[in-house]
Image: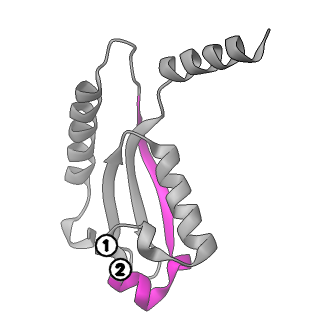
């Protein structure tokens, strides 16, 4: 297999694959507060969290966390994946976003609002 056909095969494989989508929360272990959210790309969120911790730069995280990050440090925060969305091949990006919004709303109902950012 030559280089050009290999690249074409990799491009096609990338187009067919979808990143893992789901609902997450970033938990402050010092005060118990959580930032609840959803994303169409959980791997990207994990990478942002790892990058922020490894470089000690909280700018990659949501601004709502800034005050507590300044007070407690990045090591006080952890990422929890609460729910992973099963993406079917027929789903469009809009369908995925709609499903994520529904899942996030269901998780939000389960949590005490006083402990959410």
* Residue 40 covered by magenta stretch: no
Residues marked 2 and 1 touching at CB (< 8 Å): yes
Viewport quadrant of the C terminus:
bottom left
Which residue position is annotated with label 1? 63
Image coordinates of residue 50 in percent, x first then y, are 58, 62
Image coordinates of residue 72 in percent, x first then y, are 46, 87
Please state the extent of the stretch shown in magenta in the rendering. 67-85
Q: Does 96 appear above or below 66? A: above
Query: Mark 2, residues whose alpha carbon is within 10 Å: few (<14), some, or many (≥20)?
Result: some
The residue closer to the viewer here, 72 or 90, is: 90
Which residue is at the far bottom?
71
- Residue drawn at (39%, 13%) of the image: 89
- Quadrant of residue 71 in the image? bottom left
Viewport quadrant of the N terminus:
top right
Label 2, label 1: how many angstroms apart (C-alpha)? Answer: 5 Å
Marker disc for residue 8: none
- Residue drawn at (78%, 12%) of the image: 2
The residue closer to the viewer here, 112 or 49, is: 49
Is 112 positioned to the left or the right of 5 in the image? left
The residue closer to the viewer here, 111 or 68, is: 68
- Residue drawn at (51%, 78%) of the image: 74
Q: Secondary structure at mark 2?
A: helix
- Residue drawn at (53%, 54%) of the image: 46
Image coordinates of residue 96 in percent, x first then y, are 29, 29
Which residue position is annotated with label 2? 66
Coloring basis for residues: one colour
Q: Does 16 appear above or below 20? A: above
Q: Does 114 appear above or below 12? A: below
Query: Mark 1, residues whose alpha carbon is within 10 Å: few (<14), some, or many (≥20)?
Result: few
* Residue 82 covered by magenta stretch: yes
Q: Does 100 appear above or below 115? A: above
Q: Secondary structure at mark 1?
A: helix
């Amino acid at each position: 297999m030559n280089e050009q056909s290999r690249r074409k095969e990799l491009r096609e494989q990338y187009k067919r694959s979808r990143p893992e989508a789901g609902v997450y929360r970033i938990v402050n272990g010092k005060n118990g507060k959580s930032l609840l959210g959803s994303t169409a790309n959980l791997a990207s969120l994990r990478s942002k969290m790892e990058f922020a911790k490894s470089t000690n730069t909280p700018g990659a995280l949501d601004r709502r966390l800034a005050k507590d990050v300044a007070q407690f440090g990045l090591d006080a925060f952890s990422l929890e994946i609460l729910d992973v969305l099963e993406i079917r091949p027929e789903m469009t990006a809009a369908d995925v976003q709609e499903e994520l919004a529904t899942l996030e709303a269901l998780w939000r109902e389960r949590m005490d609002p006083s402990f959410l950012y």
